[in-house]
Amino acid sequence: MLPDFYKTLSILSYLFIWCVSCYSQNAEVLSDEKPEIYNTTIVINLKKNADRKYLSLGQHNPLFFNPRYVPPPLNTIDTTTNLKTEIKVAIDKPVYLSLDFSFFYIEPGDSLNMDFETLLHTKTVYKDTLHINHGNVFFTHRNGGHRSLFDKYLDNIYGSLKNIETADRMAEFLSTESLMNMTDSCTVLIYKDHPNLKHDSSTFGTVKKSGADRFSRELIYRIKHLYINTKDESLKNAIEKSVLNILEYSCVQENAYDDPMTWGKYEAIYHFFKEMDLDAQSIIEKFNGCNDTVKQYAILSLFNDGMLSVEEKSGIIDRLTYPAFKEYAIKANQNPNKGIEKSGYINNAIRSARLFDVNDKELVFEELFKTTDQPYLLLDFSGSWCKPCLEEMSVYAKTGHLDNSKKVRPIWLFFENDKTKWLNIVEKYNLKKENCFVVVGEPGPILQKEFALLFGWEGEFPHYFLFAKDGGIINKRAKPLSMFEENDVSNLPPRENNKKSGSSIPPPPPKQ
């Protein structure tokens, strides 16, 4: 499943906190600014003035790294008119901006007019509705429960992929010709989702390029899930070849390096190779057929993930010639924690994160370890909204082979925006209730941030972590629960301590 970008509550909650802060800093008429510098206008019509607090302006990270959201371009926000918010932005090239929790593409000089209404907002549930009246813009992500035709098309393709049983059929389904036909279909669907879009050659080219890159990115993450969960070596080889085919095809196309969707596609390919447990040099070799700028993106990603050796890191800034990469590396290199081995113990922020059990009893994350008798905990980061998560649960449910394990306690940690839905999933798949917990609200982004910093979590769902009961990380990318066996914890290598992390969790007092 995609990392946090499309559905994960952890990202949405993070955005809500950040966006409210961002809005409070900008929600005023900046009369002392020169009005002519604000060349792009966004008018939002509200059903009720109270909905203004759920609106804010941000921008997609141009390099598609975390954080996904960066501060917006220079702007002014006028809220003096009843039931209307007018935002003026200064941009000199096309950008992907965020409003509320949704991303959209907009060009300099455009004028966007849209209706917005918050349908429901509680501590655990958020929904909104949005309608474009005019503006040559299109959304790459919509929040509030909206499912675009583009999204549904991807779901159908993933359903077809899951039913493929032979390597030859997989190769045929993911051939270059087939992929070209699928991306053409995506262009058509984006236009159907956005009837306001112009049909001139420039707009059509932009829509086609963005749609193709988005499609490739999301398809590769779905392919990665298939790769992880198949035991058929011929199918795994066919899947790997299909990703190499997508990479080869992408590298001969004209890439827009200032477009985040371009790097989102290569990010997905890079993460697929990481999933194969390749070392840094082997990953770099996979990109040998690409131009130098794309190769540099792979190197920068390895640097960002702390996968380069001391020798490889020493000259990285000189090797990066693309200005945005060099600027990022210089800033990142000033971070004393960059590149450290991401291992150790859960820290205080993780320990104190609030969870709820199936009886709606509140507890903190640390209690999962203190109440576990087994020497190991296998955590499944999942959600009721995540189709790959549910598929994995359905496979596990056929055996429940870890339910009574003496060595490993399986734990399902649901990241949700609605407490009710996850309980239905627990019942549906007959998961052991004492091993099921839910994260709602602010703890979601806290856990996402801390697990990313300490243990390299990229925000994708499902994800599996193996811990010792003292809070020490054993495996940052463990096998899915359905494939994990008790013997997998035998003969584990020694753990390395990370001085930046927390300390071990004291053992529980002896039972009386």
Image: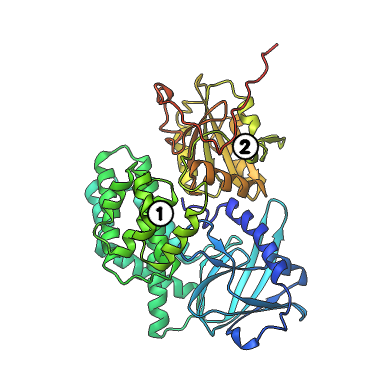
Residues at circles 2 and 1 in contact by the CB criterion of under 8 Å? no
Q: Secondary structure at mark 1?
A: helix
Q: Nearer the viewer, residue 158 or 302?
A: 302
Q: Determine crowd level at label 1: few under 14, some 14-19, many 20+ residues with C-alpha closer than 10 A.
A: many
| Sequence-earlier tag: 2 or 1 | 1
* Frontmost residue, 452 versus 247: 452
Q: Which residue is mark 1?
A: 301
Q: Which mark is residue 313?
A: none
Quadrant in which residue 413 is drawn: top right
**Is 347 on the left-hand or right-hand side of 155?**
right
Left or right relative to 62: residue 114: right
Neighbours of disc 2 within 10 Å: few (<14), some (14-19), many (20+): many
* Residue sticking out furthest to the left: 168
Q: Position of residue 209 (x, y in %)?
A: 38, 72
Residue 377, image x and y in percent? Answer: 53, 29
Residue 466, position as x, y percentages in the image:
49, 32
**Residue 440 image position (x, y, % from top left):** 66, 46
Q: Residue at x 65, y 63 (%)?
A: 19
User: Measured along the vertical axis of the image, is residue 15 above or below residue 489?
Assistant: below
Q: Quadrant of residue 87?
A: bottom right
User: Which residue sits at x=37%, y=69%?
Assistant: 185
Circle 1: residue type: Ser
Which quadrant, please, contains the C terminus? top right
- Residue 219 in sight: no
Nearest-to-viewer mark from 2 and 1: 1
Residue occupying the point 29% across, 47% down: 281
**Residue 3: in sight, yes or no?**
yes
Instruction: Say which amino acid is labelled 2.
Output: Phe
- Determine which residue is flagged by label 2: 437
Mark 2 to mark 1 CA distance (whole Å) = 33 Å
Q: In what element is the residue under mark 2?
A: strand
Please give left or right for residue 37 compared with residue 481 in the image.
right
